[in-house]
Image: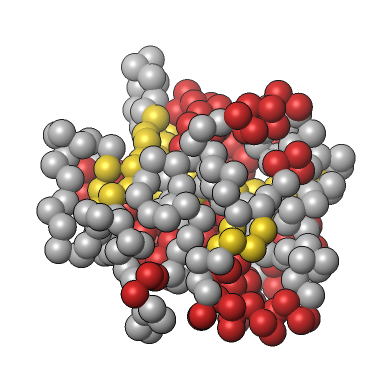
Amino acid sequence: MGSCCSCCDASHALKFSKPSRVPPDPELFPRYFQNKQGLWLRFAEWEPPREVPAVRAVLFLVSGVAEHTARYDPVALTFAREGYHVFCMDNQGAGGSEGKRLYVEHFYDFVDDFLLFKKIILSRYPGYAVLPHFILGHSMGGLIAAHVAFRDPGAWAAVVLSGPALELDPKLTTPLLRRIAPIVSKHFPKLAVRSLDIDLISGNRPVVELAKQDPFRFSVPLTARYGAEMMRAIDDVWKNMERSTFPLLIVHGSKDLLCAVGGSRRFMELAVSTDKRLIEYEGLMHEVLTEVTWRKVLSDIQGFLDGHCLSR
């Protein structure tokens, strides 16, 4: 699909970004790679500590709207201590990655970026090709992870979705809004439409307070294109459920006001896989990975992944 205007082309109006750009030198810029649009995307990795005898699996984390890799330190370090080599990238337009903040031309650019990221990681660690590969996506990252898994269901030993964006607040996605969203997205793609309420991310107050003053967690409003593309991607999920053959775990807070738990229930009901489980945590909000009981949530996830390490 071509650009609708000169202000929303593949370069995202960045001075240096273009497909013909020279990729980052891996020695000078070891934590960056270049995507198909010429954007440099930043990533992080957490290796198991030296006392761990061997890497047992590879875990890819997929972050949500406006997030960045440092927010996943507790998750990544927990799994690294258990022998998982963990990788996570900042999505384009977020964190340390290039791209206009909270703007994307097409949702599937996120999916393409992630698949390229995985390919690059496995090229750097060729021995990991024989290890189990897991993906854990949170919020919009859960939506990205679902579409990544749909592309190649057999590539994943298991898929974990945390508070996935599979159903948005109906007050925000009224029938009228759904009708006009594609029109606004086409003609005014970078129009600021709505900011996220950070108070709704977690019931753990220190988490909320840190997020509010986090210089890498941008508080700029979502753009019209971003919102419309998310809605389209959610609709596309239900068209691809026949590809949901992978082992699946979904963890979701019962008081999530950002991504309704109903979407997770529907996904679980329609998933083709017979190896699937939904855990709803009573009283928890959107970020079950950062709630006061986050250790219990990670323990549940680890138990699921450990079981699928042994089954391969």
In the rendered image of this protein, does residue 94 appear above or below residue 168?
A: above
x, y percent for residue 13? 33, 61
Q: Look at the image and tell me whether residue 103 can be seen.
A: yes
Farthest top residue in view: 51
Residue nearest the viewer, comparing 118 with 153:
118
Q: Is residue 256 left or right of residue 251?
A: right
- Name above or below for residue 71 compared with residue 125: above
Is residue 312 something one can see in this rendering? no
Q: Give the quadrant of the N terminus.
A: bottom left
Q: Position of 98 compared to 20: left or right?
A: right
Q: Nearer the viewer, residue 73 or 248?
A: 73
- Residue in the picture at 62% in, 33% down: 211
- Residue 244 found in image quarter: bottom right
Residue 262 in which image quadrant: bottom right
Residue 269 in the image: state x and y as whole percent: 75, 69
Nearest the eye: 160 or 30: 30
Q: Residue at the spot x=25%, y=55% of the render?
A: 15
Question: What residue appears at the point 69 percent right and 84 percent down from the top-left corner?
Answer: 179
Q: Nearer the viewer, residue 103 or 311?
A: 103
In the image, is residue 273 above or below residue 257? Answer: below
Residue 301 lies left or right of residue 35; in this view the side is right
Q: How is the structure coloured here? A: secondary structure
Q: Residue furthest right?
A: 283
Q: Residue at x 35, y 62 (%)?
A: 12
User: How many numbered marks does the figure carry?
Assistant: 0
Q: Where residue 268 sits in the image (x, y, percent)? A: 71, 64
Residue 4: percent from left, percent from top: 41, 81
